[in-house]
Image (cartoon, helix red, strand yellow):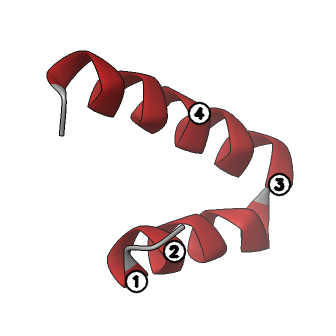
Amino acid sequence: MENPKIRRWFENLKAKSILTATVYRRTLGYYCELEKT
């Protein structure tokens, strides 16, 4: 992850649940691809 804000968001989620963090990151990635961001 290049964006430090996204990395911090992911690390905070991962501290509680690696599975939830991974699913949320994948979903964010799909959204960014759809929106071309």
Please state which of residues 29 and 8 is positioned toward the viewer in this rendering: 29
Q: Quadrant of residue 10?
A: bottom right
Q: Which residue is mark 3?
A: 18
The picture places residue 20, in percent across and down from the top left corner, at 71, 42
Q: Amino acid at mark 1?
A: Pro
Q: Disc 1 versus disc 2: distance between alpha carbons?
A: 5 Å
Depth check, mark 2 against mark 3: the one in front is 2
Q: Is residue 35 left or right of residue 26?
A: left
Q: Which residue is mark 4?
A: 26
Q: Disc 3 versus disc 1: distance between alpha carbons?
A: 18 Å
Q: Amino acid at mark 3?
A: Ile
Depth check, mark 3 against mark 1: the one in front is 1
Q: Which residue appears at 67% of the width and 33% of the height?
A: 23
Q: Amino acid at mark 4?
A: Arg
Depth check, mark 3 against mark 4: the one in front is 4
Element type at mark 4: helix
Q: Quadrant of the N terminus?
A: bottom right
Element type at mark 2: helix
16 w.r.t. 28: above or below: below
Q: Which residue is mark 2?
A: 7
